[in-house]
Image: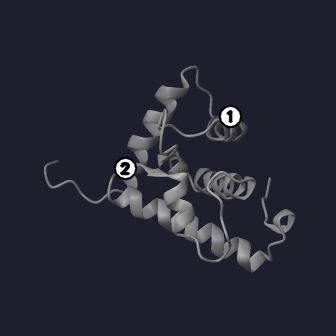
Amino acid sequence: MRRSGSQFGLTDAQWDAAKEEVRQAILDAAYDRRMTSYGEVASKVSTVKLDPHSALMSHLLGAIFDDEHTAGRPALTSIVTHKHGDKEPGAGFYEMARSLGYRFDEPFVFWAQQVQNVFKLHGKPNAYA
């Protein structure tokens, strides 16, 4: 399913720019091999006003997850989590994974594997490896 920003009143150019800003914010955290929060990601988007817990944020993250899956890469969005509480991704992460064909019985294990794969692919080289 191709997502767009039209349901949020965004032009294709605004949608693409906001998606790239979200992706870059996540990649910056991945390079540092650290988790990031919905709020931190939202604060780095200037193209549109982005509430960290909005439907727009969910759609942007879903589009990025879909793009990464299509490209054969791990779930970049796995490192975006709640800032407080469980510090895990929201339910939408697992719903999106299943809609893309991922099969897992243990969501936490699936998520942890994706996080490690993201850090391996996008993280700065480990000087001690």
Count of marks placed on residues: 2
Element class at badge 2: helix
- Compare residues 74 and 17 and report the one nearer the observer: 17
> Looking at the image, is 71 positioned above or below residue 99?
below
Judged from this view, the residue extending furthest toward the top is 105
In this rendering, would 73 be left or right of 34? right
Q: Is residue 125 left or right of residue 67?
A: left
As shown in the figure, which amino acid type bears the numbered disc 1? Arg
Q: Which mark is residue 70?
A: none
| Residue 67 placement, left or right of 124 | right
The residue at the point 43 percent across, 34 percent down is: 112
Residue 65, relative to residue 109: is it above or below? below
Q: Is residue 42 left or right of residue 87?
A: right
Task: From the image, tell me which residue sits under label 2.
Answer: 119
Asked which quadrant contains residue 102, the reply is top right
- The percent position of residue 120, horizontal first and vertical second, equals 35, 49
Q: Which amino acid type corresponds to the residue marked 2 in the rendered image?
A: Phe
For residue 9, above or below residue 26: below
User: How far across and down, in percent of the image, does residue 5 sit?
Assistant: 79, 66
What residue is pinned by disc 1?
98
